[in-house]
Amino acid sequence: MRHELIADAALVKNYIEGDENSLSILIYRHKQKIYSFIYSKVFDKDITEDIFQDTFIKVIKTLKLGKYNEEGKFLPWVMRIAHNLVIDHFRKNSRMPKFDNSGEFSIFSVLGDSSLNAEKQLIKDQVESDVRRLIEELPEDQKEVLIMRMYNDMSFKEISDRTGVSINTALGRMRYALINLRKVIDKNNIILTN
Amino acid sequence: MAKLYSKNPQIKETLNPKKETIDFLLNYSKALSVINCNKMKFEALLN
């Protein structure tokens, strides 16, 4: 069949007047360009197929509703519709990100789950309770400063105000508390790592 | 001779939509009719 003789504009006109065959010629004439254009943007055959279909649904509706007024520029007009639909597709996906893990690149190599798994959570709880018990063994003055500093997140100024000792004394007690804790940990070979 | 490390082009076949897609579009076009009614246009899909 030699359809090339008929210009796009004439085919569009015929189609608007009811000649369904003209649409068929237009689609077959431009399908490869439009399909390749969409594929070059989305790199997925199924999505390309969907966008290609949506593009022509829009073309058909516009032509049938008599809203088309770009005579002689059929292909650029269709390309623009396809382009807009590609943009819509990416917009929709950026709001609702999806990924398939079929390629070599895994998104999990970049994104990690920072929350602990059940085993690590158990170990963490165990370590924290061990540290708590060790702190209980410290002399009262050192224990008081350490708990205020580490658990209550108070500054040494606040600790000195609360306990009625100078800041230097509070600092010293904190230092000895840590030294004593380390000593006990070393002596008993306690492992406090996750 | 220097080795060429450039990748082979991934897409060798020409890209074309499936026949079903085109058939769907042609059938859709045949089924869609626009009804003019008092300066308003209605779309109707008649299968």
Image (cartoon, coloured by chain):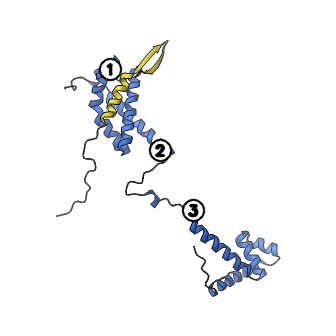
Chain colours: A blue, B yellow
Structural distance between the alpha carbons of marks 1 and 3: 60 Å
Q: Are marks 1 and 2 on the same chain?
A: yes
Hey, what amino acid is under mark 1?
A: Tyr
Q: The numbered mark 1 sits on a residue in which chain? A: A
Q: Which residue is mark 1?
A: A15
Looking at the rendered structure, the kind of residue marked 3 is Ser
Quadrant of the rendering where the N terminus of chain A is positioned: top left
Tell me the quarter of the image containing the C terminus of chain A.
bottom right
Query: Are callouts 1 and 3 both on one chain?
Result: yes
Residue A173 is at least partly visible in this image: yes
For the point 67% across and 76% down, the residue is A131
Distance in Å between CA atoms under marks 2 and 3: 26 Å
Report the side of A148 relative to A47 (left or right). right
Task: Kindly identify the amino acid type of the residue bearing the numbered disc 2.
Answer: Asn
In this view, the mark in front (2 or 3): 3
Residue drawn at x 45%, y 57% is A107
Residue A20 in picture, x, y percent from top left: 31, 21
Name the element at disc 1.
helix
Q: Position of residue A88 (x, y in %)?
A: 45, 38
Tell which subunit mark 3 falls on: A
Find the residue positioned furthest to the right.
Answer: A164
Residue picked out by circle 2: A93
Please tell me whether mark 3 sits on a helix, a strand or a loop: loop
Q: Which residue is mark 3?
A: A115
Q: Residues within 10 Å of mark 3 (few under 14, many from 20)?
A: few
Crowding around mark 1 (Cα neighbors within 10 Å: few <14, some 14 to 19, many 20+) is many
